[in-house]
């Protein structure tokens, strides 16, 4: 009993407390050129009049969290008001609180994913914790560019990865149906939801089966695509076009001319390359390769309208690589 309690305490400290402390350090321990949000007293207007306007769920939560922090600072936390005021605004503290909750959710999901049909290395608790800690560090280091949607979007994405792997391992349709709903909801968070389609296709797509005339995987992927396109196109049809834009700007020239953006690209390539080298089994390498193939539209959009220096954009791919490297996939990915 004592040993079991020690394991629970250690798990709580490692999966929740330690990541939360690291997250707090990234928000309050140092600042970057991106943390101008720290001086915003209220939810910034640009969140509702640009490409960010389509991310309705995080924008709604930002307003609610800002109001909550304002009430707490001027109410129950009034004795803490001077300290909090020196280290941010109600909006920034609300942003930290919201992102912290979903960051802990990401840590919990990663812990659950690594406990699924893992390869021999992750069967060792200490090895699993090292890989978990590495994944957490990658999330934390990207927080030099804090937003109100990325951590929530990452949480939704990792939840989708978990559902896909559970569907692979159990064959139970309940996980597939939940995944469809999750993609529809997470599209209202950020376009990263499309990567859940890429991961599902990477796991189940089998060219040999297609050559045999088995197109069942196509019919499985189709509902996921519809679940993404309906809210994605619906939002762009409903919101007033002269107040919103499909993209914030085109940055392809800056991506290949700025030393910072080139550094971000090189960082992502090197990290992904070394993660690929961790895939010792042929099936893992195949899934990893198919995932990047199906993620080409996302990579193209990053190149056109994203900034490579914001390596948070590559984070889903990096974490997926780590998960793929250590998961024991079936020899045949048939549905």
Image: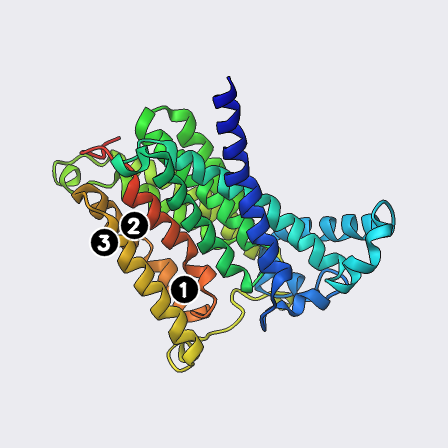
Look at the picture and state if 330 lies above or below 235.
above
> What residue is pinned by disc 1?
301
> Which comes sooner in the sequence, label 3 or label 2?
3
- Residue located farthest toward the bottom when viewing the structure as drawn: 257
Label 2 CA crowd tier, 10 Å (few <14, some 14–19, many 20+): many
Label 1 CA crowd tier, 10 Å (few <14, some 14–19, many 20+): few
Q: Position of residue 186 (x, y in %)?
A: 52, 45
> What residue is pinned by disc 3?
277
Instruction: Note whether residue 270 is visible.
Output: yes
> Which comes sooner in the sequence, label 3 or label 1?
3
- Left or right: residue 270 compared with residue 95: left
- Residue at figure coordinates x 50%, y 37% from the top left: 108
- Residue at figure coordinates x 30%, y 44% from the top left: 324
Q: Secondary structure at mark 1?
A: helix
- Left or right: residue 54 compared with residue 61: left
Mark 3 vs mark 1: give the one in front: 3
> What residue is pinned by disc 2?
291
CA distance for labels 3 and 1 = 26 Å
CA distance for labels 3 and 2 = 15 Å
Label 3 CA crowd tier, 10 Å (few <14, some 14–19, many 20+): few
CA distance for labels 2 and 1 = 16 Å
State if disc 2 and disc 3 touch (CB < 8 Å): no
Mark 2 vs mark 1: give the one in front: 2
Q: Which of the image's four quarters has the C terminus? A: top left
Q: Position of residue 87 (x, y in %)?
A: 73, 62
């Amino acid at each position: 009993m004592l040993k079991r309690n020690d394991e629970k305490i250690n798990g709580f400290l490692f999966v929740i407390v330690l990541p939360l402390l690291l997250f707090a350090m990234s928000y309050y321990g140092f600042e970057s050129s991106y943390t101008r949000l720290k001086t915003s007293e209220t939810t910034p207007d640009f969140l509702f009049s640009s490409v960010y306007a389509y991310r309705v769920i995080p924008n709604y939560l930002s307003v609610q969290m800002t109001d909550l922090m304002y009430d707490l600072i001027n109410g129950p936390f009034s004795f803490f008001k001077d300290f909090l005021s020196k280290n941010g605004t109600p909006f920034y503290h609300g942003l930290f609180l919201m992102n912290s909750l979903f960051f802990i959710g990401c840590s919990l999901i990663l812990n659950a994913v690594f406990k699924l049909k893992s390869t021999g290395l992750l069967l060792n608790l200490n090895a699993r914790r090292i890989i978990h800690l590495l994944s957490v560090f990658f999330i934390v280091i990207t927080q030099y560019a804090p937003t109100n949607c990325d951590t929530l979007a990452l949480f939704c994405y990792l939840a989708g990865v978990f559902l896909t792997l559970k569907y692979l391992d159990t064959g139970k349709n309940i996980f597939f149906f939940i995944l469809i709903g999750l993609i529809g909801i997470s599209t209202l968070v950020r376009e990263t939801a499309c990567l859940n389609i890429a991961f599902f296709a990477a796991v189940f797509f089998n060219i040999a089966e297609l050559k045999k005339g088995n197109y069942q995987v196509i019919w499985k992927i189709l509902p996921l695509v519809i679940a993404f396109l309906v809210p994605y196109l619906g939002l762009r049809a409903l919101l007033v076009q002269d107040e919103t834009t499909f993209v914030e700007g085109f940055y392809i020239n800056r991506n290949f001319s700025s030393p910072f953006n080139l550094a971000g690209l090189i960082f992502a390539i090197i990290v992904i390359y070394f993660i690929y080298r961790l895939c010792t089994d042929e099936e893992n390498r195949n899934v990893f390769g198919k995932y990047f193939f199906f993620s080409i539209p996302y990579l193209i959009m990053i190149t056109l309208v994203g900034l490579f220096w914001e390596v948070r954009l590559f984070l889903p791919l990096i974490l997926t690589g780590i998960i793929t490297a250590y998961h024991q996939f079936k020899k045949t990915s048939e549905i």
